Image: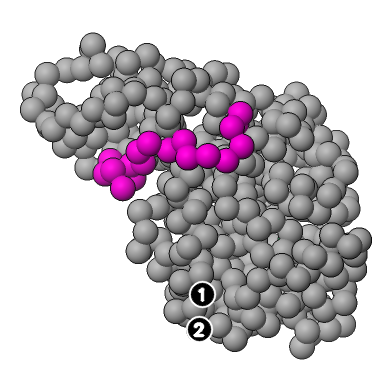
Amino acid sequence: MPSFDTVYVGFHAATMVSSIDYDSIKDAAIAVENGHIAWIGPASELPNHDATVVNLGGGWVTPGLVDCHTHLVFGGDRSAEYEMRLQGLSYEVIAKSGGGIVSTVTDTRKASVEELLTSAKKRLQALMADGVTCVEVKSGYGLDLATEEKMLRVARALGDQLSVTLRTTCLAAHALPQEYQGQADAYIDLVCEEIIPTIAKAGLADAVDGFCESIAFSVAQIERVFKTALAHNLPVKLHAEQLSNLGGSGLAARYKALSSDHLEYLSDIDAKAMAAAGTVAVILPGAFFCLKETKLPPIQRLRDLGVPMAIASDSNPGSAPVLSLRLMMSMACTLFGFTPLEALQGVTRHGAQALGLGLSHGQLKVGYAADFVCWDIQKPAELSYWLGGQLVKHRAVSGELT
Ligand code: DI6
Ligand code: FE
């Protein structure tokens, strides 16, 4: 007899194992052993077992949602800047006049570990309440060694204290700190010679990210960051083509990046390079919406090229104060022409792939983590259809209901 720990029944499952449909199972059962899926299939075919059976009482089970791009740890807030933008000032103008990312840096440097942990925990709990079981958290509001380390320690603490799988990313190359004004190359020296090596040695980051944009860093500067990351065995990813086309996504593809994120201004050549490299396109509808961007990312081209598309919240105090990943699925459909199936793939199998977790998370499959959500819905498409509301009935991480 198999030695299952728990068997879940009483739901239909959208396994997301196939790349072309929900790969659903009517009246399904999931057996869990040691936090992993040991068996999944129609309940009528469940092998004999002596494990505890938990009936989830109807609805659909999907893989737990993966939010593969967030900036959840930060001090202060930027609601005043939001009001300025509503009056017509642009994100770039605010950034250039000392607001924007740099103002969050001041607040994050001042904040204690406790303050950062308390505020980030509330935001992460909101994402979790809406179905997230796996999340990435970036640094990038420190821009000095001590504060980048502080942010990443807070991120690791979030993962220890909450029922969530958490990946951390060092985003020291996010913006130029004020003390380095006019000396971007010198700041990149600090990132490459001090910040990344120290953080890598301390095991505080799972990946390295950068912001390739005229208000941030050039392709050549990001390339130095990527070389340093790979020398420390850390995979890379990039914020690219958000506000203009600098060709960061082509660079990301050359360095076999896990993902290139935003992509409104992605060129055809770089889209092809991403397809060839297997770099995931992470689409961030929250920032597009909040900044009232009008240039659409080239979704049809990415689809034609077979580039896996993930969707993430980009949860951050400036361009995307987002607390619901499901709302991002809805926006990806309405604003960008995703299908509800593509939206669910974007926050499950493709989100996991964007974190290098494609072989362990984001699908309901034997051997994968037993991270899943049971939703109060009749059809999987409802996950993109409803704006807001409480659709989560149950949430399991490593096979335990939370
Ligand atoms: N792009 C983003 O969407 C965030 N960072 C980035 O490089 C925004 C960060 C912020 O405005 O605080
Ligand atoms: Fe971002």
Q: Nearer the viewer, residue 76 or 301?
A: 76
User: What residue appears at the point 61 percent right and 83 percent down from the top-left corner?
Assistant: 109
Left or right of 307, for residue 100: right
Residue 4 quadrant: top left
Q: Nearer the viewer, residue 267 or 269?
A: 267
Mark 2 residue's CB less than 8 Å from ligand 1 = no
Quadrant containing the N terminus in the rendered view:
top left
- Three-letter amino acid code of the residue under disc 1: Leu
Kindly identify which residue carries mark 2. 112
Query: Which x, y percent locates residue 15?
Result: 43, 25
Q: What element does badge 2 sit on?
A: loop
For marks 1 and 2, give the CA distance. Answer: 6 Å
Q: What element does badge 1 sit on?
A: helix
* Residue 186 makes an appearance in the image: yes
User: What residue appears at the point 64 percent right and 42 percent down from the top-left corner?
Assistant: 328
Residue 73 quadrant: bottom right
User: What residue appears at the point 46 percent right and 25 percent down from the top-left corner?
Assistant: 377
Q: Which mark is residue 196?
A: none
User: What residue appears at the point 85 percent right and 36 percent down from the top-left corner?
Assistant: 268
Kindly identify which residue carries mark 1. 116
Query: Where are the magenta residues, as a range?
Result: 384-402
* Residue 30 makes an appearance in the image: no
Tell me, yes or no, whether the highlighted magenta stretch contains residue 348: no
Tell me, yes or no, whether the highlighted magenta stretch contains residue 398: yes
Q: Alpha-carbon neighbours of circle 2 within 10 Å: few (<14), some, or many (≥20)?
A: some
Q: Alpha-carbon neighbours of circle 1 within 10 Å: few (<14), some, or many (≥20)?
A: many
Query: Which x, y percent locates residue 234?
Result: 55, 60
Query: Which x, y percent locates residue 300?
Result: 78, 27
